[in-house]
Image: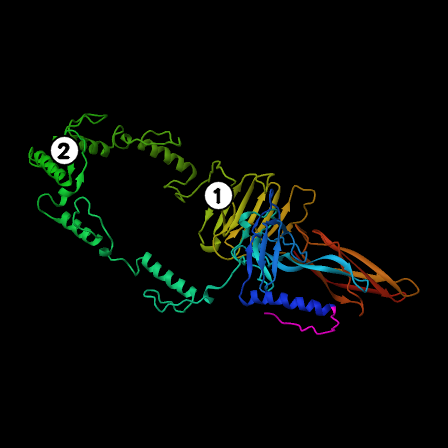
Amino acid sequence: MSGRLDYFFRQTVTESELDLGFALLEQADRDLAADLNIFGIIAGAAPAPHSPVPDLTVDLTAPARAYDHLGQRMFFGTGQSVDCAVDLVGIPTDVATAGNERWLGIFMRFKRQLSDPRTDGNSQQVFFRRDESFELVVRQAPEAAVGVAPKPALQADELLLCDIRRRPGQSQIIASDIDTSRRQAFIFAQSNSVAVESGMWNTLQPVAETVQAALDETDAELSEHFTAIARRHGANAIDFTPHGLIADANNVQDAVNELVDGLSATVEKSGADRVGARAMAGTPRALAAGSVGSHVSQLLSFLNAHLSATTGAHSASAIAAAPFGHVGSTSVQAQLQQIVKDLASDEPTLGASLVGVSDQEGRLDAQNIEHAFEETLKAFESDHFRGNESYRGQHRTLHIAPISGSKVLLLDSNAAGGAVRFRIYAETPSSVHADTPSIWFTQNASWNGSNWVRDASGYAGGFRFSSTDFEIFNDNTASSTIAWWANRWRLAMNLSNNSAFTMRGSISEIGRFSLGWTNTHTAARSCLCFVSTSFRNRLEVSPSSLTITPTNVSQSGLSTPTVVNISTDGFDIHGYQTLAAGTTAYMAGYYTSIA
């Protein structure tokens, strides 16, 4: 039902009154959908990476139909592409900080499509048709560290199609960047709003008389049954067809009882006699196919025959052995005694010289343990103090042969423990420092092959040098993985501009500035002063903010100058001041630069 209008006899109906009649009918349809809580995406509008080549747009399938929370219908019949590079007000969605991410939301909202322009009685153009249509908008949330970045809030008059993840330096949106877990799909009716009648049920006892409560109760009962927590079938309630030695039972319980009774029986043709055994070949004895009982009987017969040949197990002196190598005895007992005696001997041809060594990597020339000990001792004493010298066992010189890898660990010291752990790495030319090898000295950080990893919480840092540059770095973030050092100071020694460090990261610099104006004219004039200020060090990127604070002003009323031309090397300041004839003014203070 809808609100109604009672047009009366000889009424002069206005445009707004006619429009109101249609609006009330349209609102009735929407109120019906809203009252029944019918909303969401019915079909279509499924997101996918742009085809054929992914970029920063997302394709939506067609046809698409949806109702919003106000009961307004939205439809599009052809596929749509949504640009995710900017949001609905034109702000870029790029992620500026390494290690961060940003979530975007693609929403669809109701919109009128105006068409069929006509001219009314006042010679004004109006659109006769105002069809139901749609509008796609992109909303962005603040960027944050990976895993903790928030998603855009849901909108009361819009429907969320999907969430999109943006990453630093991203040029393509791929399938893994599209998240439909929050997609507002069509809901006809909430299951907790549909009633059931449970009065005659025997097993299910839902907490409420609704479909949702009945389904929850059914799931709980099935979960208890499938996990055997409760509602388990009794073994006597499971059918069994008699088979083999179980000839009488017709349920699982009786079958198990009959099987246990048959296997535990000690009478003939029971127990082990019921368990089959395959034939087993052997020399000089073999076992024919039969049962476990028959095999045990045959093995017992073989064992008795063997033991009855002597007074027990064979003695080692009764077991023959062929002479081999330096062992010339002919029995196991004699050979064992000779081996023990020869290994304990200190003669040059016996003892350790009889024990060989295997060196598959070719690092030793020795063929036996005695020569390997001599070779190892000589190698040790060449780089260490001997036992009869001061500092015995300590290094004389540390020699390290070439080791493959982009960053090779040379020293790892954990003497002080915790975040004081110290390491030295040798780096071959890489994509970062491709000109020459480098040496890295780090504290509280190690290289895992692709990233620096923090040993303990707190600061991590160090320095690196090569034949062409010197760099100091640190990181005070909470992330266990250091994608790149938060702060860096690099001094390039092989460039034409090498007088200062180049800084990168969160840098705050405070310095001084000063300006002066002089009016030599005989009348008041507006005077210009323009000065340049250089940073103490070069910045790798231009500052994100720069402010000047006057602290020493020659007179009141002077306007604050303007900062222009901010770069990685410094900035310019200019300002106009109106001075009386033949007067001067000055201003000094400090600037604050944050990169």
Quadrant of the image containing the C terminus: bottom right
Crowding around mark 2 (Cα neighbors within 10 Å: few <14, some 14 to 19, many 20+) is some
Which amino acid lies under the numbered mark 2 shown in the image of this protein? Answer: Ala
Answer whether residue 87 is visible to the viewer in this image. yes
Residue 479 % position (x, y):
52, 55
- Give me the residue at 63% from left, 67% from top: 25
Crowding around mark 1 (Cα neighbors within 10 Å: few <14, some 14 to 19, many 20+) is some
- In the image, taking residue 541 as reference, residue 446 lies left or right, namely left
- Whether 417 is among the magenta residues is no
- In the image, taking residue 502 as reference, residue 256 lies left or right, namely left
Residue under circle 2? 316
Badge 2 or badge 1: first in the primary sequence? 2
Residue 5 % position (x, y):
66, 72
Q: CA–CA distance between discs 2 and 1?
A: 55 Å
Rendered image coloring scheme:
rainbow
Residue 416 % position (x, y):
45, 54
Observer-nearest of 415 and 206: 206
Which amino acid lies under the numbered mark 1 shown in the image of this protein? Answer: Leu
Residue under circle 1? 409
Q: Is residue 527 above or below residue 425?
A: below
Q: Is residue 322 above or below residue 515?
A: above
Look at the image and give the residue range highlighted in magenta.
1-14
Badge nearest the viewer, 2 or 1: 2
